[in-house]
Amino acid sequence: MKVLIYARYSGSGQHDGNSVERQVEMAETYAKANGLTITEPPLIDRAKSAFHAVHVRGQMGKLLARVASGELGQGDIILTENIDRLSREKVMKAWDQLRVFTNAGVTIITVANKARLNEETFEEQWTRIIDPLAQMAGAHGQSEAKSIRTTDNWQRARANGVNMTTALPGWLNQDKSKRNERVKTVRDIFDLYLSGYGASVIAKRLNANDVRPWGNGRKDTYSVWSSATVAKVLKNRAVAFTVARPSPTMWLSNCSARSSPSFRFTRSPYSLR
């Protein structure tokens, strides 16, 4: 019998609140109290939304694949904090996902309320189906309302020219004045890239010239440039434009874009131009 722990959180705020640590500790406490032995390290989806099913591309997707392959099945147990850790999609989609596990004989135990969800308990008393369905509906409704409020707030902020975050690009001070030495570094990075140099070579050149890299809003500087930090500058849409549609992953060069007629661009308030 396999006994697994599944934990998930959606964003950095939950991470700061030790969400994963709490979830795992609750599951371990339940397992110890009920004579269960955890058979492998906790499976954790970090910063993966269950409302948009992003977690299905992470550990949750691997769990579903293990069920499909027969690796997980009759008698195995998955411990999780609440039903909404598994899914926050619409009720029937969330229910279908739960049924993938229970149909295979896997028992889901939500340790917060000590509920055992499996074929046996549902058959013994069909009314036990109601509680997880109600929780699924509540979780989805809560996430949907939050999504609508957040989208509306951002749209209003954009329309009124209000900043929704204090995390500014590294080439700006908090008063939005430009940090000229960093502006020059950004331009140099794009000049080198457009000349055919890759991120690794660019990083080596910057380090050789003792150019100090910068971080994000939580960490102002890093010790050295790497291909990753160079790539973050190259992919930062705030350099020149913001892509309005269709893909948030489209990245731009300095004051130019690899674009097509189907793309619409707006000037970034943090542009170097």
Image (cartoon, helix red, strand yellow):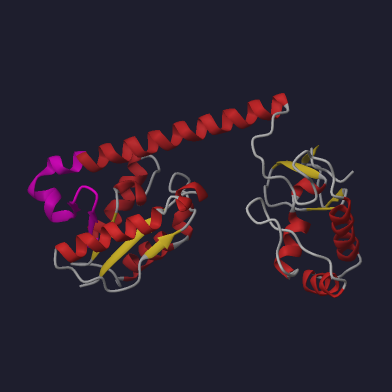
- Which residues are the magenta region? 104-130
The relative height of residue 48 versus residue 136 in the rendered view (above or below) is below
Q: Nearer the viewer, residue 209 or 155?
A: 209
Q: Residue at x 32, y 65 (%)?
A: 67
Which residue, as the protein is rendered here, is positioned at the far left? 124
Q: Is residue 105 visible?
A: no
- Number of numbered discs: 0
Comparing 143 with 210, the one in front is: 210
What residue appears at the point 27 percent right and 57 percent down from the top-left corner?
26
Whether residue 202 can be seen here: yes
Which part of the image, by quadrant, shows the C terminus? top right
Classify 226 as above or below 247: below
> In terms of image quadrants, where is residue 264?
top right
Q: Quadrant of the N terminus?
A: bottom left
Apparent side of residue 162 relative to residue 146 in the rendered image (left or right): right
> Where on the picture, by quarter, is residue 187?
bottom right
Q: Is residue 120 magenta?
A: yes
The picture places residue 176, in percent across and down from the top left corner, at 79, 40
* Residue 254 on the magenta segment: no
Left or right: 96 as drawn, with respect to 174: left
Give the residue at x 11% y 50%. 123
Give x and y (percent) for residue 212.
79, 64
At 73% across and 28% down in the image, what residue appears?
Answer: 161
Q: Nearer the viewer, residue 73 or 206?
A: 206
